[in-house]
Image (cartoon, grey):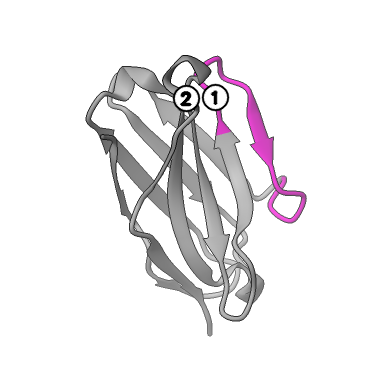
Amino acid sequence: QVTLVESGGNLVQPGGSLRLSCAASGGTFRINAMGWYRQAPGKQRELVATKARDGSTNYADSVKGRFTISRDNAKNTVYLQMNSLTVEDTAVYSCNAVLFPIYGSRTYWGQGTQVTVSS
């Protein structure tokens, strides 16, 4: 069982920055990709960014150039640096981990952290 614990969500003004963290525990050697998804009120959950164990990344078009995902495999932690935030970035951000195919590609989720962008 993989457990994901997020932190860093907060209220920030438009144009501001935040850094989210997600620490994984429990059989972390099985984890391939880690990433972030978000869900705004009344909208479906959407991909923000993911980073695989081999370093490859994937970003939503809406965050390219503003958000950066990084990962410390030694600490089993993934980060999301968010810059130039807009009100459209307001959402619950959830950490995600996907196991290697040999382990069934099982997906785990964190509990979510609220990011509110408002003046």
Q: What residue is shown at x 50% (from left), y 59% (from top)?
A: 17
Which residue occupies 33% across, 17% down?
A: 29
Instruction: Count residues near mark 1 (Cα–Cα under 10 Å), then give few for <14, some for 14-19, many for 20+.
Output: some
**Residue 59: percent from left, percent from top:** 68, 42
The picture places residue 72, in percent across and down from the top left corner, at 37, 25
Locate residue 18: give its quadrant: bottom left
Q: Quadrant of the N terminus?
A: top left
Q: Nearer the viewer, mark 2 or mark 1?
A: 2
Q: x and y percent of residue 58 in the render?
A: 67, 35
Image label count: 2
SS for callout 1: loop
Asked which quadrant contains residue 4, the reply is: top left
Circle 2 residue: 104
Please give left or right for residue 84 compared with residue 101 in the image. Answer: right
Q: Which residue is denoted by mark 1 in the rendering?
A: 52
Q: Residue furthest right?
A: 61
- What range is drawn magenta here? 51-64
Rendered view: 39 above or below 74:
below
